[in-house]
């Protein structure tokens, strides 16, 4: 067995790759593991917030420049919040004084593309050993750290374990003991469409707060080539209390809403409506322990207002 690695990161999503990059730029060796090979899909709203662009720009502006050159995103310059009566409130994203961001303050990019880009950035760094396509089977506590057992019998010893394997993390539940509380959790569904009309030409994303679906919202986020990420999310305790079927509610908005349905009249859905869970950051949990720390969704850090997880995942990876 090889000598222990200083840091082992489980999960190569936004939280895991951001942690690996931050360590690499500080000259610290690490191992980054993911059960998937990339590119791979991940059910998500696909919004890449200003938190992400700011952190990457601080780390290395060339990363943002390389991302800017990729045809895999739509620039985001603001948000439109629609009240239940349909009246919008706009928040434009104005660059801060002295900002040196080379592109837009935010983006929408399919996780298939964005996560693959981030993994490729990690692969540039000699300080990071990438192990893809191997699932973690077990964790064993050692006096000086952890031993991570992979499919195929390989074992990696590490002094510090960073767990970034998402909302369904076994380590988070069974070792760290984070509970799933419905009042600190949301359910969501999303689908991809092509040909949705009425998209804002300024690059604004849309959040529609519908009377029958609060606390929650319906979203429409633009994607390249005339596509859109369309979804609906609601806090889980209200889903249970009201017995809301999110997929049916989603279809009702698309097909029957007096205003929004018109925008989908000629649109085509690409693939199924898919569901996922969002562990919200509204609860207070212990996310670190002896020689380990949880990151991103595994640490229940999804923004409780917007449901966005990528930005807080990045932050947790950078400060880990």
Image: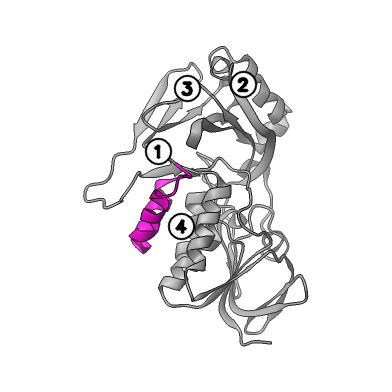
Q: Quadrant of the N terminus?
A: bottom right
Determine the CA span between mark 2 and mark 1. 23 Å
Instruction: Specify the label residue 254 is tagged with.
Output: 2
Q: Is residue 178 visible?
A: yes
Residue depth check, mark 2 versus mark 4: number of the one nearer the observer: 2
Q: Is residue 136 left or right of residue 21?
A: right
Q: Quadrant of residue 298?
A: bottom right
* Crowd rating for badge 2 (residues with CA inside 10 Å; few <14, some 14–19, many 20+): many
Residue 69, given in percent of the width and then of the height, sits at 39, 50
Determine the CA span between mark 4 and mark 1. 20 Å
* Crowd rating for badge 4 (residues with CA inside 10 Å; few <14, some 14–19, many 20+): many
* Label 4: element kind: helix
Instruction: Specify the label residue 83 is tagged with.
Output: 3
Determine the CA span between mark 3 and mark 1. 21 Å
Label 2 or label 4, whichever comes before in sequence order: 2
| Vertical comparison of 120 with 5: above or below | above
Q: Which residues are magenta?
A: 49-73
* Label 1: element kind: strand
Q: Is residue 124 left or right of residue 39?
A: left
Label 3 or label 1, whichever comes before in sequence order: 1
Instruction: Specify the label residue 315 is tagged with.
Output: 4
Label 2 or label 3, whichever comes before in sequence order: 3
Instruction: Specify the label residue 224 is tagged with.
Output: none
- Location of mark 1 (residue): 76
* Label 3: element kind: loop
Residue depth check, mark 4 versus mark 1: number of the one nearer the observer: 1
């Amino acid at each position: 067995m090889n000598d222990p690695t200083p840091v082992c990161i489980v999960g190569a999503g936004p939280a895991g790759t951001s942690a690996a990059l931050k360590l690499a730029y500080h000259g610290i060796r690490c191992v980054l593991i993911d059960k998937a090979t990339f590119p791979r899909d991940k059910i998500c709203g696909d919004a890449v917030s200003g938190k992400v662009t700011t952190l990457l720009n601080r780390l290395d502006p060339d990363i943002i420049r390389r991302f800017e050159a990729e045809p895999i995103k739509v620039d985001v310059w603001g948000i439109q919040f629609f009240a239940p009566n349909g009246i919008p409130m706009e928040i434009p994203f104005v660059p801060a004084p002295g900002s040196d961001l080379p592109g837009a303050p935010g983006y929408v990019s399919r996780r298939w593309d964005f996560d693959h880009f981030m993994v490729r950035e990690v692969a540039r760094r000699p300080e990071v050993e990438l192990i893809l396509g191997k699932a973690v089977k077990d964790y064993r506590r050692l006096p000086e750290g952890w031993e991570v057992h992979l499919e195929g019998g390989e074992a990696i010893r590490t002094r510090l374990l960073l767990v970034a394997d998402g909302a369904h993390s076994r380590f988070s539940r069974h070792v760290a003991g984070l509970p799933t509380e419905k009042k600190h959790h949301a359910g969501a569904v999303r689908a991809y469409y092509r040909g949705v009309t009425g998209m804002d030409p300024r690059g604004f994303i849309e959040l529609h707060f519908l009377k029958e679906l609060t606390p929650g919202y319906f979203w429409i986020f633009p994607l390249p080539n005339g596509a859109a990420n369309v979804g609906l999310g609601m806090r889980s305790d209200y889903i249970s209390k009201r017995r809301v079927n999110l997929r049916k509610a989603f279809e009702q908005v698309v097909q029957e809403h007096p205003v929004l349905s018109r925008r989908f009249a000629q649109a085509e859905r690409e693939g199924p409506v898919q569901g996922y869970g969002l562990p919200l950051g509204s609860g207070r949990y212990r996310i670190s322990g002896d020689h380990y720390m949880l990151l991103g969704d595994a640490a229940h850090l999804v923004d409780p207002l917007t449901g966005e997880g990528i930005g807080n995942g990045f932050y947790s990876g950078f400060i880990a």
